[in-house]
Image (tube, coloured by chain):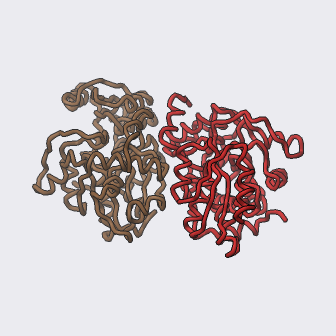
Chain colours: A red, B brown
């Protein structure tokens, strides 16, 4: 089994009542600065303010009545947990979320807001705890990325981009485990192979760059990143072969560039995005990714969940 | 002479090469909170990040060669000055701007950025100084609102809203001197009189509410407002009769409500707007303006020029 365009089309129909077809905007005010035609796909305006709801919804809507009755579980300190919590409330099922103690307070509040049961844990213990919960309570695990249903849901972003900007030249996708970039690349390459799809990951955690070079899944040293949505140190097993097959290029971007990108988006384009979402624009802005003036480039803005006080991180950033 | 739909249509063609047809988005994530269908017309994504460029461009493009050669002048501490400076650089003409010492540093930087000559002044002296500059140098004055060419330019926002959301029920327009609300009301009422157009002004400076009640132009006491784009204490002479004829209702909104609106837009809709732009959404949020769940309401987001440090004004605001 793998992922195909028809899975993504089915996902789109399945999740349509629950998600927003988010806007894709041209940002002419950034074009002189970035040196290309600039488009953004605004998943920060999605329900729960992140693309994660697409994959979560596509998975939960395929569970049996019995599975729904027992409830779902996941481990997350961020947007995935938020989406599982929101979806579970919407469908009236029980959700349990193992939240590591590294979760930013703002994201923890969002997970709590929809009434999921929170079980505190650590980054090291969280997957063990999650397995234990599955075994003991019969909960169904909703994985953040390493799952074909989740990837099919995330791939619906790609279908929308093709409709909204059929003559896109390049799509830049922030990458952590590979759920979003795998889904989008499948949707795009199986429908319109003139559009190039690129993954972008923190230079501190170049797991896809390393894995592609080694031609096998490779774990990288955890040097940490301020991009709290891009913390994976290893590609997902199911995601890597898809990325290998369909993604055109993988770029790595510095911490500084991400901050610059976030500030540019906020101050010049008037769009609030998470720092993880700003990695593509930051990379181009900081000349770590090369573009051409005639290129129509779509940057996927993956989420916008940040607390007001987190804005102070970029107070002194200059772009 | 007055303002008509055909002036606004001509303005639209005239300024088309220089302005952005800004996005009009539905913000489903705010609908439960605000209790209506929520749409925003995003002039904060306009060139110079405010609607002001429309009126300025429509005026300057109608000057004679001789007038262009002598240059233009205005007095402004904000978005109008920024637009005059930007337009003058674009067209290669000289601009002189009398800037009162109350101008926020961020806006002063924006005015300077495009190379206009800045003459420092005070709020009290600025109009006298402006007249003196017109007399001594033969500069042409570009008024901020009390001018039919300026109003025709601002009215193009109304034409775009009618195209982008033809079944709008209500349009809420922030009002200071009356240039934008007068222009939009003319465009809308002369094309589609089923759409209601409302002005919104700070409760601290209710000059339109007072003037409408008195049936004549009335100056109000200057109680000040944090909305630095809405500081007029008297409606424009040319604007008032148009507002009287075409605007359905005028609402006044508290200072607190504006701050709440700005924070809601930023944190939940991920859109950075000036506090002046947030007056309509803030009024509805704070129950100072009543709406119905089935209403399709378009809020005009007039600008997005604020310095990073100004965000601290809303750090402790709760919505």
- As drawn, which residue projects farthest toward the bottom? A65
Residue A316 at x, y percent in the picture: 52, 28
For image coordinates 42% across by 68% down, the residue present is B166
For image coordinates 39% across by 33% down, the residue present is B85
B218 above or below B250?
A: above
- As drawn, which residue projects farthest toward the right? A215
* Quarter of the image where the N terminus of chain B is located: bottom left
Residue B19 at x, y percent in the picture: 46, 47
State whether residue A72 appears in this view: yes
B132 above or below B249?
A: above
Q: Nearer the viewer, residue B303 or A95?
A: A95
A92 above or below A128?
A: below
Residue B102 at x, y percent in the picture: 28, 29
Q: Nearer the viewer, residue A300 or A14?
A: A14
Residue B224 at x, y percent in the picture: 22, 39
Q: Is residue A65 left or right of residue A85?
A: right
For image coordinates 70% across by 38% down, the residue present is A202
Q: Nearer the viewer, residue A135 or B290?
A: A135
Q: Total of numbered circles in the picture?
A: 0
């Amino acid at each position: 089994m793998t992922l195909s365009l028809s899975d993504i089309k089915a996902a789109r129909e399945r999740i349509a009542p629950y998600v927003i077809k988010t806007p894709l905007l041209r940002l002419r005010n950034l074009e002189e600065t970035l040196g290309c035609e600039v488009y953004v796909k605004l998943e920060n305006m999605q329900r729960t303010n992140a693309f994660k709801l697409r994959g979560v919804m596509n998975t939960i809507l395929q569970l049996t009545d019995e599975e729904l009755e027992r409830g779902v579980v996941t481990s997350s300190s961020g947007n995935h947990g938020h989406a599982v919590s929101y979806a579970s409330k919407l469908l009236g099922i029980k959700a349990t979320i193992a939240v590591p103690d590294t979760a930013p307070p703002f994201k923890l509040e969002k997970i709590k807001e929809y009434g999921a049961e929170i079980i505190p844990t650590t980054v090291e213990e969280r997957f063990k705890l999650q397995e234990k919960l599955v075994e003991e309570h019969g909960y169904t695990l909703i994985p953040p990325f390493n799952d074909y249903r989740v990837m099919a849901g995330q791939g619906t972003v790609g279908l929308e981009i093709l409709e909204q900007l059929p003559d896109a030249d390049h799509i830049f996708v922030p990458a952590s485990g590979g759920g979003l970039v795998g889904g989008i690349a499948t949707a795009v390459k199986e429908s319109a192979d003139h559009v190039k799809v690129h993954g972008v990951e923190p230079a501190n955690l170049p797991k896809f760059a390393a894995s592609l070079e080694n031609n096998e899944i490779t774990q990288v040293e955890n040097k940490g990143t301020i991009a709290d949505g891009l913390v994976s140190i290893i590609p997902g097993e199911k995601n890597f072969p898809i990325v290998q097959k369909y993604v055109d290029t993988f770029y790595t971007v510095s911490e500084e560039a991400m901050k610059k990108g976030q500030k540019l988006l906020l101050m010049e384009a008037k769009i609030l995005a998470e720092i993880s979402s700003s990695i593509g624009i930051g990379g181009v802005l900081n000349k770590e990714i090369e573009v051409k003036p005639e290129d129509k480039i779509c940057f996927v803005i993956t989420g916008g969940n940040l607390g007001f006080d987190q804005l102070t991180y970029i107070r002194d950033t200059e772009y």
